[in-house]
């Protein structure tokens, strides 16, 4: 399953097949200026009880082409397209880690970040989902803003934090990150806690009030 290549300055929802399910032609969409989208997010207390990463089956090979979700994202986001060898081994590619504004040529230097971490998703609504829906979230190739290739150490520093606790060190990346965070929360119907909403509001007020459009999952 190949995603539409990610273009850093364009944040549009891809109307394509999603891992584990297919977006119907009549799927609902949400569209609003960024600040309106932030204000519309539902505030609720987060609950971590019962969380286990294994409850989100991830890095599956949905279309059995030999490349799991991790490699599908790497192929889609490469600024220089890699050669794809046996077992989906990638060579000759180049990737931009927008969190820290740096390019890399080794796939092993990169993690695929769930913009909204699996634990954060659990806390804000996914604990009530079926395993199938959690799998779809964890392997979401239907919107290029859900998963992003970034430097592994930067991803590890982000961990499962929300924007009240962590932001990209590269300040010019922060508005993009806020947009993508809001898109994922809206796409999957996830809530925010009060500190998270306050941080999103503050950051969004300093960003261009672009319109975000997303197909709801």
Image (cartoon, helix red, strand yellow):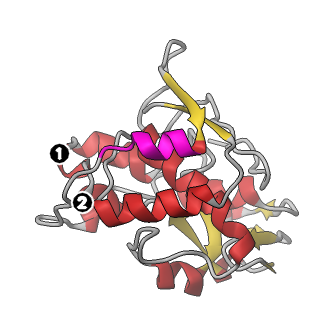
Q: Is residue 37 magenta?
A: yes
Q: Quadrant of residue 204?
A: bottom right
The one nearer the camera, 71 or 163, is 163
Q: Is 28 located above or below residue 12 in the figure?
A: above
Q: Main secondary structure of the magenta part?
A: helix
The secondary element bearing badge 2 is classed as: helix
Residue farthest top in this picture: 26
The residue wearing badge 2 is: 123
Which range is magenta? Answer: 35-42
Q: Residue at x 26, y 49 (%)?
A: 126
> Could you tell me how far apart the alpha carbons at marks 2 and 1 are, in whole angstroms?
10 Å
Quarter of the figure with residue 15: top right
Residue at the disc numbered 1: 128
Task: Tell me whether the residue at label 2 lies in contact with that at label 1, contact meaning CB atoms closer than 8 angstroms.
Answer: no
Mark drawn on residue 194: none
The quarter of the picture where the C terminus appears is top left
Residue 24 appears left or right of 42: right
Is 101 placed above or below 153 here? above
Point out residue 183 in the picture as x, y percentages from the top left corner.
52, 45
């Amino acid at each position: 399953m190949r995603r539409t290549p990610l273009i850093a300055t364009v944040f549009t929802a891809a109307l394509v097949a999603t891992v584990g399910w297919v977006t119907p032609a009549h799927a609902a969409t949400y569209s609003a200026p960024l600040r309106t989208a932030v204000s519309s997010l539902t505030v609720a207390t987060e609950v971590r009880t019962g969380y286990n990463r294994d409850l989100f089956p991830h890095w599956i090979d949905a279309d059995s082409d030999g490349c799991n979700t991790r490699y599908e994202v790497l192929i889609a986001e490469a600024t220089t397209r890699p050669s794809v060898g046996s077992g989906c081994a990638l060579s000759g590619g180049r990737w931009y880690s927008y969190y820290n504004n740096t390019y890399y040529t080794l796939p092993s230097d990169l993690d695929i970040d769930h913009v909204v971490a699996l634990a954060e998703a659990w806390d804000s609504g996914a604990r009530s989902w079926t395993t199938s829906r959690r799998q779809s979230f964890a392997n979401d190739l239907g919107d290029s803003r859900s998963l992003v290739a970034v430097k592994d150490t930067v991803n590890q520093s982000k961990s499962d934090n929300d924007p009240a606790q962590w932001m990209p060190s590269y300040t010019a990346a922060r508005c993009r990150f806020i947009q993508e965070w809001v898109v994922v929360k809206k796409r999957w119907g996830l809530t925010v806690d009060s500190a998270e909403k306050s941080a999103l509001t503050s950051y969004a007020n300093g960003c261009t009030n672009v319109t975000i459009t997303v197909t709801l999952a």
